[in-house]
Amino acid sequence: MAKTPTQPGSSAAREARANSGVDEAATTAKPAAKATAPAKAGAPDAPAGRLKRLRGRLNAMSGRPSASYYWIIATTLALTCIGLMTVLSASAAESISAGVDPYSLFLKAAMFAVIGLVLMMVLSFVTPAVLKKLAWPVLGLSFLLLVAVLTPLGEEVGGNRNWIKLTETLSFQPSEAAKLALALWMGMILSLKGRLVGEWKHTLLPVVPVSAIMVGLVLMGHDLGTAVIVMGIVGAGLFFGGGSKRVLLGAVGIGLAAALVLAVFSGNRTARLSGWMGNCNDGLGLCDQAQNGLYALASGGWFGVGLGQSRQKWSWIPEAHNDFIFAILGEELGLLGTLVIIALYGVLAFAVFRVIMKRNDTFARVVCGSILTWIIGQAFVNIAMVAGLLPVIGVPLPLISYGGSSLVMVLAAIGIVLSFARTDPAADAEQESATISS
């Protein structure tokens, strides 16, 4: 009888396995064992997987970060770390001269930096819809705080009454919160007006009267420098919101005239202007702070005298860790160090401007444009003041000068810009569904 033909090579393979002593069942079981191997290997990566899923959920709610998002975070961290380093160098000398702990101001600055950075990252996940809802409550709270400064709760420091004393060693400056509140509120109001904002009536009302009240409250505390910065924020908000050019030019003219009048009718401000113009009276020391700041910049040379080696910080420059901290930077790090600081502000400005250009809604443009003008404009005023290009008006250098209120509010403002530096979750969902359907 004929044999049933077998598959070529199958009998030979079975004979070879039998002769070699390899169990066929074990051989067939090996692929199953290999299939389960990846599951065991992936077990240690479970925490990374959970972190990835959490990041995916956050990005789904708030949008994915763009390239500008990381540039803003990098420059902010760099400027904050440089500020803490310089605050330690400048404040330690003054603290030793006063007989107190040389690390006290640095530790307070570090605490405020941590609080501000945490607040920045939290606000970076807040959506624009939530920010719009917060505009009115934040503006109302800042108004009440500015009014509280004029009550017995307020505290006068250096001739300016712009602080609220919380404890014996802790105080808060409401005018810093007013800057952020005005930026949010103007963005919400101008976005509701739409194209009507181009008409002079809609540009004027209600932004200009409300802003004038806020500026007036700041001026009642004799803080002209902060009032000038607030007026610049308001002007930037109207500009980025597409307001009437006639109202903008008129507001700028009125603001400059008011600042000049307030400077003329104040003895302290008149003395500062006189000293800036070269009419120094050695008996009164009108030019000591400005001149010693220039001496510090000049003695730094190209590469500086070294970290912590400043000589002008030893009671020669008043408030060396605050308004004139750029002079200490120039002395210790030299011209190249100051150029690096200016370059970091430039990169920050470019990244924020990219966010403004990519977001096509009025709310984002006004808020980010106002914050950009606040930070970069205040940095320009401070650096020009130290370099002798402007009179001494007493505004800190953002992210670098000592001051808890200023540092926390600037970091909070950057957190809001970071929220706009994320993509729109709704647009991402539409794009993803279109890709799946195609």
Image (cartoon, rainbow, N blue to C red):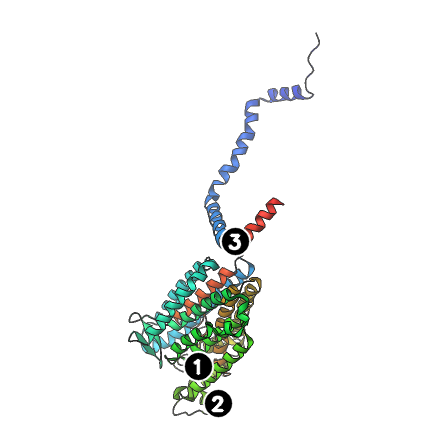
Q: Are marks 2 and 1 in contact (CB under 8 Å)?
A: no
The amino acid type, in three-letter code, at marker 2 is Met
For residue 277, which numbered disc appears in the image?
2
Q: Residue furthest right?
A: 2
Nearer the observer: mark 3 or 1; the answer is 3
- Mark 1 crowd level (few <14, some 14–19, many ≥20, 10 Å Cα): some
The amino acid type, in three-letter code, at marker 3 is Pro
Judge left or right: residue 148 versus residue 74. Answer: left
The residue wearing badge 3 is 425
Distance between the alpha carbons at the discs numbered 2 and 1: 14 Å
The residue wearing badge 1 is 393
Q: How many numbered circles are shown?
A: 3
Question: Which residue is nearer to you in this view: 380 or 286?
Answer: 380
Asked where in the image residue 166 lies, by quadrant, the reply is: bottom left
Q: What x and y, as percent, mark residue 353? A: 55, 67
For residue 164, which numbered disc appears in the image?
none
Label 2's element? loop
- Give above or below for 75 relative to 428: below
Q: Earlier in the sequence, mark 2 or mark 3?
A: 2
Q: What x and y, as percent, mark residue 164? A: 33, 72
Judge left or right: residue 105 versus residue 327. Answer: left
Label 3's element? helix
Q: Residue at x 38, y 74 (%)?
A: 91
Q: Residue at x 32, y 77 (%)?
A: 150
The amino acid type, in three-letter code, at marker 1 is Ile
Q: Earlier in the sequence, mark 2 or mark 1?
A: 2
Q: Work out whether residue 81 can be spotted.
A: no
Q: What x and y, as percent, mark residue 215? A: 42, 77
Nearer the observer: mark 2 or 3; the answer is 3
Q: Residue at x 49, y 55 (%)?
A: 62
Q: Are marks 2 and 3 in contact (CB under 8 Å)?
A: no
